[in-house]
Amino acid sequence: MVRVKADERKTLRNPLLGHAISHRGTIIGLCAIVLWGFMAGLVRLVADAFGATLGSALIYTVGGMMLMIVRRPASIRKAPRKYLIIGGAMFIAYEASISLSIGLASTAAQSVEVSLVNYLWPTLLVLMTAAVSHKRGAVWKALPGAIVATIGVAMAVGGESLDVHEAMRNIASNPLPYALALAGAFIWAVYATVTPAMSDGYDGTTIFFCCVAAVLWAIHFASGQGWPTSMPSISGYVALAACALSIAGGYACWGYGMLHGNMETLAVGSYATPVFSTASSTVLLGVALGVPFWIGVVLVVAGSLINLWFARRAR
């Protein structure tokens, strides 16, 4: 009986960072991947209706208000200062780097390539999660699945339009957006890996989200762009509300999942983010899915299963 109880207590602790885990926390964290999947297509619709900088500021403002209503944070005095400073800085830096990288892409092809660079974050997250697990050979065991899944992401997102030689020329001619996207991928992977340990159970997602909104408003007014010359249609406002729900809800679910769920499962599950994003964008924007996408899906699933298999063997 004592051994059973000891095992039960052990299963309630995250093996990586020591915080309590639950199946509910893991499921809620995985919901973030589905919500984020709608983000790219909805952001495009909002940008078409309100403009790029104003649309981004409105998305995070509406999303921040949603979070304040449904997930009002505890008193900021209860938050560890290190978590607020380091976690907040990384959260804002990630959002700024991604927004700027997409805005600085000069062609549609560069936009796709920049998105691919940003989508390295699931791979980096899997490898970093393996590294902090302190399990022998964890990183090497995670590498095969990471490589397979990353190739799948490239095929699913890039499709038939991906040309390695053209991508190298684009990087040489316009390196800044690629550098920002790569920096963003690293920042988010580090944020997701290290902040749960320094948070002491405090979830600062709502505070960080509102800080991003303030930064985006500053960027909008600094750019000299004003308000739209004509009022957007009702579909623009619907897209704004849906996009705010997608992004804010995704971050809220992810923050909860990282604090209470299984980091290994969430890290591997994050491979599905670009796949969901590409699929939803094609539906929202009326684009057909080609054969490379479905091959990419198979590879992403295969890579994820490889990672899960190694993770279970390591337990």
Image: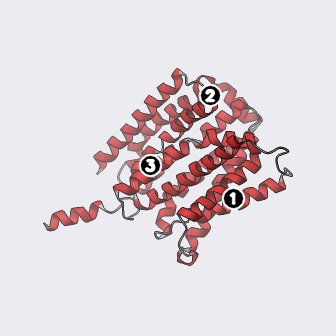
Look at the picture and state if 211 lies above or below 166. Answer: below
Residue type beneath disc 3: Leu
Look at the picture and state if 77 lies above or below 16. Answer: below
Left or right: 37 as drawn, with respect to 257: right
Left or right: 79 as drawn, with respect to 49: left
Residue at 65% across, 62% down: 210
Comparing 178 with 32, the one in front is 32
Residue at 54% across, 73% down: 79
Quarter occupied by residue 106:
top right
Q: Residues within 10 Å of mark 2 (few under 14, many from 20)?
A: few
Mark toward the start of the polypeptide (3 vs 2): 3
**Label 1's element?**
helix
The residue that mark 1 highlights is 213
Q: Residues within 10 Å of mark 3 (few under 14, many from 20)?
A: many
Mark toward the start of the polypeptide (3 vs 1): 3
Comparing 67 with 95, the one in front is 67
Residue type beneath disc 1: Ala
The residue that mark 3 highlights is 30
The residue that mark 2 highlights is 286
Q: Position of residue 72 (x, y in %)?
A: 55, 67
Mark toward the start of the polypeptide (2 vs 1): 1
As drawn, the residue found furthest toward the front would be 234
